[in-house]
């Protein structure tokens, strides 16, 4: 958390002064009203610079601010519109909803086939598109963790 009165260029100056190689500094804004917050995202050239910063924090004039690493998303993301991975519905280019039971172009409430006809269009498995034991889901999870 960095005081709102300290602009990004002062943060960059303070970091380069102590020998850190900074690529970018961005103050994050609230979603509602686009109001600046005290949270600052700093991108470093490499992990060594990042780790040094996390251990030492930020010193601007006589003020010291603790630093912490951003938490990484450890779960795969699946769009509930098209049922594909790596994006959410807000950014989906497909506007036609896919059924999680059969993969056809309708919502799950309009599914009329028997439950034994369930199949996931991406892997052709006999399970819902959102199943945690789907080979595609497991592949996505493995990709994120490794």
Image (cartoon, helix red, strand yellow):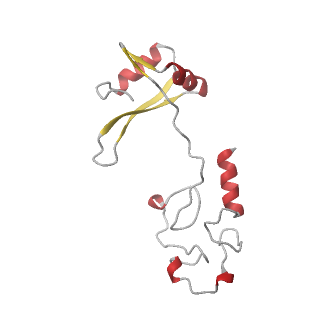
Instruction: Please tell me whether residue 41 is drawn above or below residue 112 in the rendered image.
Output: above
Instruction: Please tell me whether residue 13 is drawn above or below residue 71 in the rendered image.
Output: above
- What's the residue at 56%, 75% (across, down)? 99
- What's the residue at 47%, 21% (across, down)? 57
Instruction: Please tell me whether residue 36 is drawn above or below residue 59 in the rendered image.
Output: below
**Residue 66 vs residue 139, the one in the foreground:** 66
Q: Is residue 33 visible?
A: yes
- What's the residue at 60%, 28% (across, down)? 47
Side of 19 relative to 34 (left or right): right
- Quadrant housing residue 1: top left
Q: Position of residue 17 (x, y in %)?
A: 45, 13
Instruction: Please tell me whether residue 109 is drawn above or below residue 41 in the rendered image.
Output: below
Q: Position of residue 45 (x, y in %)?
A: 55, 27
- What's the residue at 70%, 63% (across, down)? 133
Side of 58 relative to 100 (left or right): left
- Quadrant housing residue 25: top left
């Amino acid at each position: 958390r960095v005081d709102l009165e300290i602009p990004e260029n002062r943060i960059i100056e303070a970091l380069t002064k102590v020998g850190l190689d900074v690529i970018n500094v961005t103050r994050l804004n609230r979603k509602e009203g686009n109001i600046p917050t005290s949270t600052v995202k700093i991108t470093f050239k490499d992990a060594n610079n990042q780790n040094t910063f996390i251990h030492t924090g930020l010193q601007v004039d006589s003020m010291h601010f603790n630093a912490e690493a951003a938490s990484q998303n450890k779960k795969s993301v699946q769009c509930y519109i098209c049922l594909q991975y790596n994006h959410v519905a807000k950014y989906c280019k497909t506007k036609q909803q896919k059924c999680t039971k059969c993969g056809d172009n309708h919502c799950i409430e309009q599914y009329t086939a028997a439950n034994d006809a369930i199949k996931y269009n991406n892997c052709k498995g006999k399970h819902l598109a959102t199943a945690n034991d789907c080979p595609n889901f497991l592949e996505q999870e493995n990709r994120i963790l490794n």
